[in-house]
Amino acid sequence: MLKLNKRHVTILAILLSLSVVLLSAGCSQTETAESTTTDALTTTTDAITTASDTETKIEEETTATTVKTDDSTSTETAEPTESTNDPQWIFESTDLAGDKVNHSYLAENKVTLVNVWATNCPNCVAEMPDLAQVAKEYADKGVGFLGIVSDIYENEPDEIIVSIAGDIVADSGIEFSNVMASDSIIASILAGIYAVPTTFFTDSEGRIIGELVVGAMSLQQMKDNIEIALAEVD
């Protein structure tokens, strides 16, 4: 019998609560997204800022250097490097094929479309073929794609759900990476998202750009939002 420690119980409780909220808020919608949600974008950006600040704090703490003097040893701290006001998304996870993926994935393109979805969300699955098509159309235009499967926890993946997710991706013709909900993704992204599907965009440095869209999009809406994101980096 599998024994869960307090941390596991807490994380599983968060994921279960998130799944209930996502299903009730996102998959109960029957219409495609007609507008972006400013509050959702602010919440997601705040979550990324918190995660980014944590990483920065760790880096600053490691800059301390020990300096020996004639009769004592003192510690000096190097000045922290100047950072941008825009938060950068830092993450690492595992994709459905078992390969490791981290934020360096975002550096491969000028813009990356990130689609957060769940295997038990009909609207998420319905827009997958369009995502596959638009990914192929923009492959040579500096646009990358990344999926986040919100109902698969990386540390304890349910093999049945992993298999279902793999079938959905394959049947839709999707060729880009789809990663599991790792600790860093839960803290930096899922903490600020209340419905699936949710789609947002980053630049090559992991900064949130363009429009955040809550709800399923049509093919044309995907293209329009990609163009908005590209206009910000060109």
Image (tube, rainbow, N blue to C red):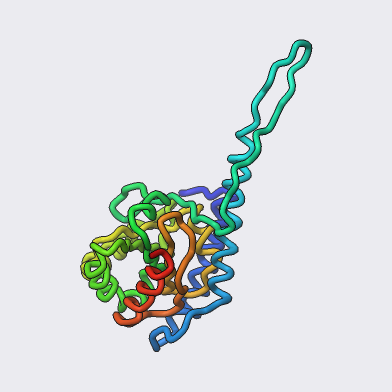
| Extreme residue toward the bottom, this view | 31
Q: In front: 43, or 28?
A: 43
Residue 80 falls in image quadrant: top right
The front one of 110 and 222 is 110
Q: Quadrant of the C terminus?
A: bottom left
Q: Is residue 199 above or below residue 207?
A: below
Q: What residue do we see at 22% from left, 65% from top?
A: 170
Q: Is residue 117 visible?
A: no
Total marks drawn?
A: 0
Image location (x, y in percent) of residue 220? 31, 82
**Which residue is the extreme one toward the top?**
70
Residue farthest toward the front in the current orientation of the protein: 234
Q: In the rendered image of this protein, does residue 131 appear above or below residue 202? A: below
Instruction: Return the x and y of residue 53 as percentages of the image width and height.
Output: 61, 51
Tell me what residue is drawn at x 61 percent, y 33 percent.
63
The residue lying at 55 percent from left, 62 percent from top is 13
Residue drawn at 46 percent across, 52 percent down? 91
- Is residue 137 positioned above or below 79 on the image? below
- When asked about the image quadrant of residue 145, the answer is bottom left
